[in-house]
Every structure is written in structure tokens, then in C-alpha cells.
Image: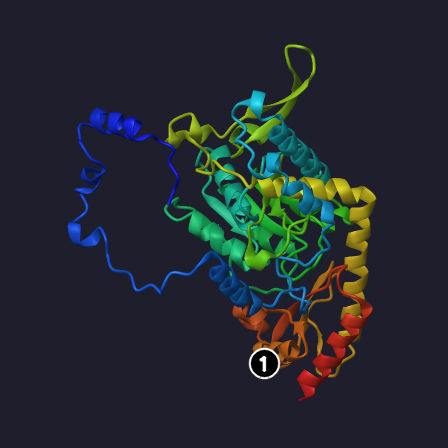
Amino acid sequence: MTYIPHSPKERDAMLATIGIRSLDKLFDAIPAKYRFPKLDLPPALTEMEAASLLDELAGSNESTRQLVSFLGAGMYSHYIPAVVDHILRRGEFYTAYTPYQPEISQGTLQGIFEYQSLMTALTGMELSNASHYDGATAAAEAVNMAFANFRGKRRKVVLSPTVHPQYRETIRTYTQGMELDLAGDDPAADLQAAPEALLPLVDQETALVIVQYPDFFGRVFDYTRFIESVHAQGAMVCVVANPTALAMFKTPGEMGADIVVGEGQPLGLPLWFGGPSLGFFTTKKQFVHKMAGRLVGETVDSRGEKAYVLTLTAREQHIKREKATSNICSNQGLMALASAVYLSVVGKSGLKQVANLCYQKAHYAAAELGKIPGMGLCFSQPFFHEFALCVGKPVDEVNAHLLDHGILGGYDLGQDYPALKDHMLIAVTEMNSKEEIDLLVEVLKEAVHA
């Protein structure tokens, strides 16, 4: 129940204003038989009993604290410095007021400003919004922005089949009713083909082309020439990026991308059994008036001292909604702060070290797994810290065997790509030791030859 701190006198005044005498009258529109239904609930518990029961239920869960994890596919087990959680739990951040009134929101505004500055540096872009709910919704918002940029005159979006399947599903959900032509979104496509295979789909009707970097299978492509070819048709390019990889490889900004989005979870956020998460969204300055969400700027106050303000706010909150780019009017502010703290603490060299550890360990794992008879890598292109592995047996059976040995196995690619039946996506991060990788190799040998 929500606590509403109104006195009886205040409640009576409000009821009198709307012309009724009691709170019960507010519910006359609800049929009486539905107002107080009998609920099949267990007997009430004391606070101590409830806490004990919840501890018991939580104890049945297994996490990366108990299991060795090689599962990624968009959410990754990374080390998070203790200071990240310490700062998030401070009352001034944990219960921060929404930043519409700068005179009482300087801390929140500075946190967002620092986050936005860090994300532009990481992606090589010119500006960032405050954040979206997750990587998938950020990708869908890129479609909204491109559609608005062309004022609805271009109605085709080319979507690479190697973009995360859940991102593509979210985009399809977002664009229902927009009469958009989603081309290229075909899980039965030739997955060995280079990104240039999408270019014949790009024409004068195309508003946006979306690719992933590294792609869903972990492969790394330089999209520079690809982006030039798309721009030649007048279309925009959105790159869905893994932020950890950006510390090691050429940034999408250097490649000429118009929009860079992605999942911010690798930047200081726990897995949390699926969320909450963070979607980052960066773009070029020329598109700032089409970008959804908030933009915080640095200025000076009347005394000449540094201050932070909302330079641009979500237009859907202030104008007619039919003129808005998006209906997103909130952001994952606390999660954005976590990523800002993480990036500030590890720094540029630290993030490069994390990326390098992921890269080196993943390549060691791939080399060792490739020696197992009957197994092999699906693709020959360079990869970051994920790779597709043919296991030759149903992935759910293999993963069940791994779980018996305390190992959380890879993502079953066959559930999204029919051609990759009996293939799993293995993710390796800095959290995986050589001993754990060797254990994975030994247990997979057992699983395949059982």
C-alpha cells in the first residue's frame, strides 16, 4: 500500500472539492463483488518468519558466485570494484530527486554529465543521452530516431541477422504499426557472409542499417567501408557495440557510425538474474534534436561557479506527444551512475587491461576446445571474448552435464539459428582462470564422448 501523508481534514477537503462525502464513493464504478475478493493466501507471517522463508527460497538459486560461468550472449560476468556498490548505496544517490530542478539536483546532474562524457569517449561519438532501459530498447530507439530524422519519408530498416536475436525481436515489437520494411532480419541467412552481403538491400528508401560490433557470434569486423557505402545511399548506420571491446578495438565513431548503442551491463553492473540494466545511446551532434531522453550540460551559475543543467530534456514531456521522437521519458539513472563510477575507477588503462584479459583468455579457451575431436569453431573471423563452438550433440544435454560439474555452459545458438543446431556460444571474461578453462575443456571432452 502506498503511504499518502494526508490528514483527515485534507482528505475531506479533497473529497468535498470533487463532490463526494467518503472514500468509499470513489469506488462506486467498480462492481461490489470485485472490490474485496477472497484471496487464497497462506496465513500471515511475522517479519522474522518471512525473512527466514525468503532466505530459504533465495538459497535455491545458483549464481556466478557458486558456478563457473561461460555464459554470455549480451550479459557478462565481470569483476566489479567494491567502491561501485558503496557509492550507489549512499542516500544522496540512492534516493536522488529527478533532475528537473537544478538547484537541488546538482549531484544527480553531475553524475549524468560524467556518464555521458565517458560514454562519448568510449564510443568515439559526440554526445550521449542519459540512458535507456537496456541495450535492446536503445537499439529500438535508434530506429525511432532515424525514422524521425527522415520525417517518415524513408521506411526501410536493414537489420543484420547477426545482431542479437533479442534486440531484433525488441525492434520488431517497437515498430509494429509504423509500416516499416525490416529487411535482412533472417536467421536462415548465410551466417558466414561478410557484412557487405547486406549492401544490396540498402537503397534510397533505407533510413537505417543496424550491425553489431563484435557481432552476436563474437566476430570483429571493420565497418568503415561498409558505412561509407551505406552513407552513399543517404542512409544512417547504427552500431550495436560491446563497451568492453571498445577499449581494445577501433571505435564505431572512427568508422563513421551515426549512432552507437549497446548494453551497459559490462560496465560495473551485476548480472542480477537479468536486470536492472542500462542501455547506452550515443550519436553525432547533428542529430541531437531527434535524440530521445535527457542531455545534461555544464555551465556556470550567477556567481560564476561550475553548475550542471538539463540542456535538453525529453520533448515528449513538454509538447504534443505526436511530435515526440519517442515515449521514453525515464532513464536508468542509478545504473548510469554505476557505470560512470566503474569507468572512473578502472580508468582507461584498467579497461584496456580488462579487455585484453578477456581477449587472451577467450583465445586460449578456443584453441584448447578446438583440439577436442568432433568439436570446432564455427567461424574463422577474428573474435573478441565470445566464439561459436560446434559440440555435435544437443546443447541442453551438454549444458546439463556441465552443470553437474558446477559449470554454467554456453548459449544454445540453435534456438535462434536453425543452421547452428548443436552449437553453443562460449563467453570468457577476466573472471575465468586458466584452471577453470582447463576444467571446461576436460568436462566437455566427457560430455561429447559420453
81 to the left or right of 145: right
**Colour scheme:** rainbow
Identify the residue position indicated by label 1 in the image: 397
Residue 390: % across, % down? 66, 75
Residue 66: % across, % down? 67, 68
Quarter of the image for the C terminus: give it.
bottom right
Residue 142 vertical position relative to residue 357 in the rendered view, above or below: above
Looking at the picture, tell me which residue is in the foreground, 154 or 36.
36
Q: Residue at x 60, y 31 (%)?
A: 108
Quarter of the image for the N terminus: give it.
top left
Looking at the picture, tell me which residue is in the foreground, 236 or 29.
29
Callout 1 amino acid: Glu
Crowd class of label 1 (few under 14; some 14 to 19; many from 20; radius 10 Å) = few
Residue 87 vertical position relative to residue 354 in the rendered view, above or below: above
Q: Residue at x 48, y 40 (%)?
A: 144
Residue 5: % across, % down? 38, 33
Looking at the picture, tell me which residue is in the foreground, 271 or 426.
271
